[in-house]
Image (cartoon, helix red, strand yellow):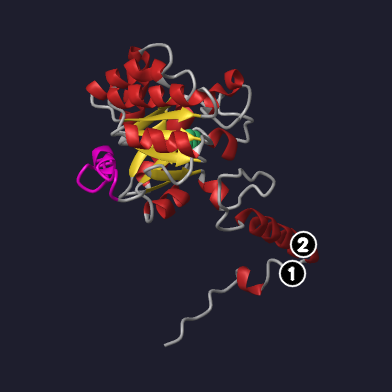
Amino acid sequence: MSKQTPTRRLTAPAIQAMKGKTAIASLTAYTAPIASLVDRHCDFILVGDSLGMTIYGMTSTVGVTMDMMIAHGRAVVEHSERSLIVIDMPFGSCEESPEQAFRNAARIMAETGCGSVKLEGGAHMAETVAFLAARGIPVLAHIGLTPQSVNALGGYKVQGRGGDADRLSADARALSDAGAWGIVVEKSTESIARRITQETPAVTIGIGASPACDGQILVVDDILGMFPDFRPKFAKVYAELGTAADDAIAQYAADVRTRAFPAKEHTFADAVPAKRG
Ligand code: KIV
């Protein structure tokens, strides 16, 4: 049986019910060891298509495939037991029609055991969200900066400034009315985040969208300092694992070259030492 059993896991409705009561904590995870750590502390885990950049070194999320999302999604579901697992629908998997979105979302859910999918886009995706929600697929929407549209947006700019605010508010209302249980609001101003949070029954999950949201999400690699040369303004670094890993690898290579490694304790003797007692 899949580990995504409703009795043990937080569900999308349970997280939506936290609105106005408890702040929702979430991070991305893409691999088994990180999933089991995040699972101990967060309410939901997003297998984000940011894995295209963090795991595969791509320059954007546009080239991420369904197979990549399913492979990583399965690892995260299998190595977590408490959090709701949400899996991103990659670029090109849901924009064509509600039917295409249903086919791909159903495949993601059936092959991974996750409890929800996430898709990017505003009011134009509301019909798709309604189609999925009516067929038993909980949807987390994603507005503001939507990285899959980076080529159309002309870069990773702050959203919600000027006339943008009314459009973002209309997007959020359309997605919430269509049945989205939550809305990720990325790289947007505090005033628009507050407005959307007040206007919609969906929970707002901010990433670079101020404390006015119902909860927060960050890319796990960013909080762990895995990329010392890439520090988004909105991400707080809680550990410097990138630098620590670089130091450890440099020390290992130096030890090999000076023959300090392997030492006696890492080496097998001819005879197995007799056990005492
Ligand atoms: O792909 C991703 O990681 C995201 C963010 C919201 C964290 O969409």
Percent of width and height locating residue 38: 42, 52
Percent of width and height locating residue 8: 23, 48
Does 152 sit left or right of 139 as displayed?
right
* Mark 2 element type: helix
Ligand 1 within 8 angstroms of badge 1 C-beta: no
Which residue is located at x 62 percent, y 73 percent?
265
* Mark 1 element type: loop
Can residue 111 be seen here? The reply is no
User: Which residue in the protein does label 2 denote?
Assistant: 254
Considering the whole magenta stretch, tell me its main secondary structure.
loop
Residue kind at label 1, given as amino acid type: Ala
User: Which residue in the protein does label 1 denote?
Assistant: 260
Among numbered discs 2 and 1, the one appearing first in the sequence = 2
Q: Quadrant of the N terminus?
A: top left
Mark 1: give few (<14), some (14-19) or many (20+) Cα within 10 Å. few
Query: 210 above or below 258?
Result: above
Residue kind at label 2, given as amino acid type: Ala
Percent of width and height locating residue 92: 48, 18
Q: Quadrant of residue 41?
A: bottom left
Mark 2: give few (<14), some (14-19) or many (20+) Cα within 10 Å. few
Asked if the stretch drawn in magenta spans residue 199, the answer is no
Q: Would you say the residues marked 2 and 1 are in contact, meaning their CB atoms lie under 8 Å apart?
A: yes
Which residue is located at x 67 percent, y 60 percent?
248
Query: How far is the residue under mark 2 from the one under mark 1?
Result: 8 Å
Q: Nearer the viewer, residue 142 or 131?
A: 142
Query: 152 above or below 9?
Result: above
**Region rendered in magenta:** 1-21
Percent of width and height locating residue 170: 39, 22
Which residue is located at x 41 percent, y 88 percent?
277
Q: Nearer the viewer, residue 10 or 108?
A: 10
